[in-house]
Image: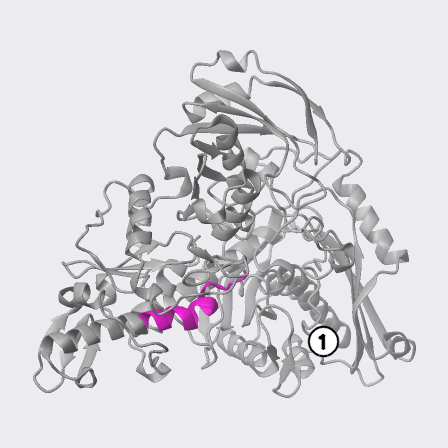
Amino acid sequence: MTSVVSRRDLLRYTGAFGALVLCSGIIKDARAKDVGSDNAMVGPLVRIAPDGQITIMYPNPDMGQGSATAVPMMLAEELDADFDQVVVEAMPLMIIRRDDGNFAWKVVPQGSGGSTSVPDAWGAIRRLGGIARELLVRAAATRLGVSKDSLRTEKSFVIHGETGQRLTYAELAAAAAEVSLEEGFEPTLKAKADFRLVGTPQKQKAIWDIVTGKPIFGLDATYPGAKVAVVARSPYLDGQVKSVDDSRARQVKGVVDIVVMPRPDTDKFYTYLAAGVAVVADSFWAAKKARDLLDIEWDKGPYTHESTMQFDIDCKAKLANGQGQIPRNDGDVDAAKAGAARTIKRQYRQPFVSHAQLEPQNAIAHVRADRATVIGPFQSPSGVSRITNAITGLDRLSIDVHFTRLGGGFGRRLTSDHAAEAVYLSKATGLPIKVIWTREDDLAHDFYRPAGHHEIVAAFDAGGKLVSWEHRLAGASKYYRRNGVPEEEYWTPDLYPDDFPAGLVPNYRLEYFSMKSGMPRGSWRAPAHTANAFVVQTFLDEVAEEFGRDPLDLRLELLGTDRELKYDGHGGPVFDTGRLKGVLRAVADASGWGRQMPTGRALGIAGHFTFGGYCAQVADVEKLPNGEFRVHKVWVAIDVGVVINPDGLRSQCEGSVNDGLSTALGQEITYEGGVVPGRNFDTYPMMRMTEAPPEIDVIITGSDKAPSGAGEMAIPPAAPAIMNALKRAGGRRVRWLPYRKIGAA
């Protein structure tokens, strides 16, 4: 959707935010400060109270990535607000219908995914801050009877330069809300050299509430009269309910209703994820107890032949004997291989992985005849609006969507199936419904990270120069059930044609085999970059080992001279080889790359370009005698352009390293007979605190380029840097993940 916000719209949001205030009383902690009628809206995202408190609405759901601090920082910078006086509040979904019938953002884009929160907000949010500042300055000029050009702003004051008179934003807010700007007015935004707030370390605005247990996550949210629903979902992939005996379940005290949920249309993308039987009750425990007493006979669906073992066998067979689609084919790879002095071929394997978000799925919905309200932890509020429209037929402008803080997301909550369940059940029962998943539900019914087998074949001339590169993937695409996407386009979320080393080797080919699977698939942190960086960066170390080369020197040589290459994928339009070389050199310098290491310890390196950002890592790893290893330290160098909040950026890098290591160590979703078994964290092992690197040193290189996001950039290099170090320390070469289950291929 596009953004549409007119000059007049900026001053006409008081009524719209009345609904927000009403909803805030429902979903927010009663200890939070009430919104008074004497607070003034200065533009659509700024509310100023008489005591000087400035509330900035943040449009992008926060799941720990810090968007609820970084995005308001941009607005506060242009507003010249005292950030200590700023509080933040989630903005409800705000969309409008255009003249052509399609929908557009009413103010700014709203969603968190693909590391887009910061880059999407960079221009639009700063503009809104600049406009709000202009309104305050004009109000001050009128009050003081002076030219607006004689006024300046600083830390929530408008100051008259000649007389030194100072007016607070609080004093001016009501008058500023009535100021009109001339048609076509555009604020002059600050140059980087004039930033006072952007680029300074800031703790998350919610940090104190987080450590004292006050923030309202989806599981904490309440709604008047809401009943709780717990769903017994089909354990079989695309299974159906054949029959259900609910007589014992209905005897549980507090049970209100039991609803059969038919399987969604398998020819389309999901509304909710699976067929099931929902128990609606007065409390979670009553609903769960009754669910456990249901006697359900399942139609096992079309995938009972599927298993992890068979999927691996089928992928290997495709790579060995098949001929797939060719998304990119530069030069003549076959001729280059035929004339090469040496060819190196390796295969790698990535498993299905769960998002394992700490907060299990949940959502509240209240569907009425003419309106619906949906509340919960959503990465895509507009997706919730669309899916509610699909289920209820209500006009999207009659659907109120409010997102809470998210207890993790990582791409899982880009899919709005948890909201769809609540909406479906509210419509079916006529009641406000809060759907709550258990941990076992969450791990057994996910949109998993796609699995696949990769093969890379590289050819070299007599001098050891790379002359051809071939990357082949047999994988189960996350696009297999996306409306209107034909199978010949399934490769697009799994292979990025312009990724390194595309454009750097004369003969380059990508080949894709679309594997059939009933496993639900979706986006998982940096989607394909996570898998492909592990494959490519591991392979480069294998090449360096074969030729007796230094892994860093090999990477720098392949990147060649500093230049910008065309990059059509997300994060483009260019890939800058100089910026990737810059983070590789920075992390090498910081870690002392090339130094003598103790026996059984080594450094490993990896670097990758993800969604507009450049990140390289060096890991110090010790091989242990029991087949395990210890990561002593990880250095991270990152370039995401203009840095909004260095503290938040460091936190994202630290979390990404731990997440990348945790996933590589032991995480895998397996299945047998078309069934994903229910699990908890005892059988789906997350990394323990004692296994985490005790030191993570983040080097922010930065640049004057427009900012990229940071939520995903440090994930892709983590696992290959660590596994490359392990091999250099005398451990095994890891080509199949997870490490603790399969190890070396």
> x, y percentage for residue 601?
59, 64
Front-lying residue, 124 or 610: 124
Instruction: Name the residue carrying label 1.
Output: 502
Among the 4 quarters of the image, the one containing residue 668: top right
Front-lying residue, 63 or 271: 271
Taking the spot 58% from the left edge, 15% from the top edge, the residue there is 246
> Relative to 331, does residue 442 appear above or below in the rendering?
above
Overall secondary structure of the magenta section: helix
Q: Is residue 380 left or right of residue 505?
A: left
> x, y percentage for residue 308?
74, 42
> x, y percentage for residue 679?
59, 35
Front-lying residue, 337 or 346: 337
Local packing at callout 1 (Cα closer than 10 Å; few below 14, some 14-19, many 20+) is: many
Which residue type carries mark 1?
Ala
Bounds of the magenta segment: 114-129
Taking the spot 62% from the left edge, 60% from the top edge, the residue there is 530
Q: Quadrant of the C terminus?
A: bottom right
446 in magenta:
no
> Relative to 58, does residue 672 appear above or below in the rendering?
above
Q: Residue furthest front?
A: 99
The reply to whether residue 579 is in sight is: yes
Q: Is residue 739 left or right of residue 360?
A: right
> Relative to 628, does residue 132 appear above or below in the rendering?
below
Q: Is residue 662 left or right of residue 77?
A: right
> x, y percentage for residue 512?
79, 61
